Image (spheres, rainbow, N blue to C red):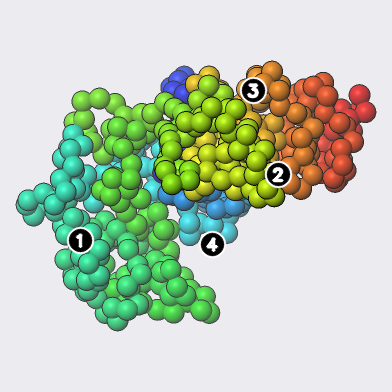
Amino acid sequence: MRRYGVPADMIELATERRRAGDWRGACEAANIAAEVDLAEVARSCGAAVADQVADDLAHLVPDLLRWHLSGTAEPLHAAGAVTPLSLYPGGTALSVRGPASTDQPQRLWLRFGPVTADEAGRGLHLSRERWDDRHTTDLLPRCGGRIRLPFFTADGTPLPGGGAGAGVEERTEQVVRLFKAGQIVEAWTVAGFTLDAPEHLLRHARPGLTMLAERARRLAAATGSDVVMAHLPSWSAILLDRLDDPHPRVRVVPTHNGPPPGVPVLPHAAHHWPAVLDQLRDGDYDPAQLHPLVGAALFPVRAAATMPAAVELPAPVRIRCGDDWHEVAVRDGALHTPHPPRELSRERALTALAGRAPAGCAAAVQSWRTGVGLPTPLLQLRAGVLRHVMHGESAAVEALLDAGLDPHVVDTRGRTLPHLLPWLFPAAARLRILDRLLAAGLDVNAPDRTRWTPLHYAVLRGGSTSLIRALLAAGADPAPSGPPLLDLAAGHRRDQVARLLTG
């Protein structure tokens, strides 16, 4: 689940295209490259598999998939990780692959092809509620509820102490509290398991106990096995057997030499409560800003639909200035402090003559445009702004500029917004934003701390030919210092980039 990368306008456009039957257009709206050729699937795997893939694609909700993929931490997803969505005969799958690096445009790729056992072990093929419109309502039972989300009423009102009763919601609430108190054996027992393992081996495991047995039984039935495995954080795994008993047995086995052969594996997403349960319970996420399909599943009688909030300029922060605390805010295209500009200029001049660095608000204003030495509150403010860029949210960036964001903001590597244009999506938005940045006086030849210019990033990060052409038209040096541009171009693009650079 994420606060960045799946804005309301992405959800609305992807939903419109999906409902019109355009799954490729829906993927494109969600910044997912759909590289699935159904005709090729039919040729290589047969018509039956191609029909299954086509059916899954017709029900794919790409914006919901993107929303669920990431956890609470940045980056968006494990670098380059392949996540199978649906498995087919012959060891093939419909999968989504994340970007190879966190320092490149955060675009996803949807593909069909073979997958490894390790990749299947972290897939979403047993968690279709995270991407398939036929299963979105399954999210509530996956969070340990039946008619309401644990710790909430059905309309989304918090129940800090949990509810009263003997239903699955109350049992989930009790298990969560026991886990939080470190009472591991008690948590497993309340959930209905027979524990045949030392407590210390399970101390760092937090599976979704009130839905674990049901998921294990389904996997066992589908694979014809009488035992199911779930990986633990260390080199060990949980083995669940006696699944036909009301109280399945739990054992722990080492996996240093590989998992037990022939035992089907429950992927992490299938044996853990979704992160949304903890994030909502702990107040880390506003229920009103959930993805609308998530909100409808978790709060079925909520009066208003949920939707991520519109982007706004970050709130002012307070920083130390001398013996006082001053409020600093980004607005009207600059970083504002309580000091008049002349006073800040004088402070910087005096400290320069004295051979020392400015402090307080004078230092903050200077650091804001150099990227170095920002006080912690401003570091956090800048990080929030730049996450919209790094996740490709062009509409959010334009909204921030409209609201008064200083376009001269610089990141920790000395990169300006022109350096980061390849991250933005769709490609046409990069050109609009480039025009705004040029009008604000930004330099298309400004180097970052590694002497790379915006043109370096446009070539290396797969920037569109239109962006490269626009940077050159704006005066970008086709042979800047630093690494040669052609050395950065992917093999299939070298000729194209060479033609652009030579006119």
Q: Give the mark toward the camera: 1 or 4.
A: 1
Q: Callout 3, which amino acid? A: Ile
Residue 147 figure quarter: top left
Looking at this view, is 385 or 298 the one in front? 385
Q: Residues within 10 Å of mark 2 (few under 14, many from 20)?
A: few
Q: Residues within 10 Å of mark 1 (few under 14, many from 20)?
A: some
Work out whether residue 490 can be spotted: no
Q: Callout 4, which amino acid? A: Asp
Q: Residues within 10 Å of mark 4 (few under 14, many from 20)?
A: few
Q: Which mark is residue 364?
A: none
| Residue under pointer 1 | 177
Image position of 121 with respect to 261: above or below:
above
**Which one is earlier in the sequence, the residue at label 2 or at label 3?**
2
Residue 285 figure quarter: top left
| Residue under pointer 3 | 433
| Residue under pointer 2 | 353
